[in-house]
Amino acid sequence: TQLLEQSPQFLSIQEGENLTVYCNSSSVFSSLQWYRQEPGEGPVLLVTVVTGGEVKKLKRLTFQFGDARKDSSLHITAAQPGDTGLYLCAGRLDSWGKLQFGAGTQVVVTP
Amino acid sequence: DSGVTQTPKHLITATGQRVTLRCSPRSGDLSVYWYQQSLDQGLQFLIQYYNGEERAKGNILERFSAQQFPDLHSELNLSSLELGDSALYFCASSATSVNTEAFFGQGTRLTVV
């Protein structure tokens, strides 16, 4: 079983629609990161959240870390085809711990 | 370009063989992570080194081993290869182990035939 469960596994939407991707765990994380991976490339970091209840915005992307630091969400407003990719959440159980990944959510945005 | 270099990009080898994957971290990064990514398993953490010392171990098979050298580059050795070892192997580096961004290389695609 995965330490971090991501949902949905796959999401296909039209350009201009909104979407939300979820990352859940029964464990408490020291920090949580979101990455985006495109085919043939390594994951690229989007954001790091460390404080329970923290909300970070990156242009049309909004990231939220749950109050209990067990879950997170990524919301994309007015999605564009360039947002297509595999979105991965990753967390550390303590500051020096290994960085573990969820299975990812494949997002496809069609024009 | 993340600054992390992995070689080779592609590797095709037969079952039972041994291969070595190489990773050069970003300049100044002390921490190196190895991950295996396959279609059915996602990105699986294998092992982490920090300044030459093993820091954390994940689901790394006994047939696999790694090390980090004094110049901070790292190698992942895979032996007695099986068909199921076919996957993308990623290396990532970070400045420290503490809540910092991990920068990923482009990966080595290993195909075992």
Image: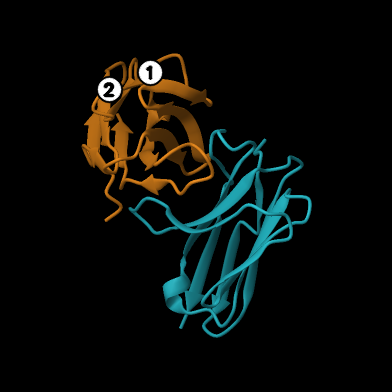
Chain colours: A cyan, B orange
Residue B16 falls in image quadrant: top left
Outermost residue toward the left in this view: B8
Name the chain under label 1: B
Label 1 neighbour load within 10 Å: few <14, some 14-19, many 20+: some
Q: Quadrant of the C terminus of chain B?
A: top left
**Residue A50 location (% of width, % of height):** 63, 52
* Secondary structure under the numbered disc 2 in the rendered image: loop
Residue A19 falls in image quadrant: bottom right
**Residue B3 location (% of width, % of height):** 27, 49
- Circle 1 is placed at which residue position? B65
**Residue A15 location (% of width, % of height):** 51, 83
Task: Using residue A5 as the reference point, say whether residue B65 is left or right of it.
Answer: left
User: Do marks 1 and 2 share a chain?
Assistant: yes
Of B59 and B55, which appears nearest the observer? Answer: B55
- Circle 2 is placed at which residue position? B69
**Residue B56 location (% of width, % of height):** 51, 25
Q: Is residue A60 above or below residue B21?
A: below
Label 1, label 2: how far apart the Cα atoms are:
13 Å
Residue drawn at x 25%, y 39% is: B6
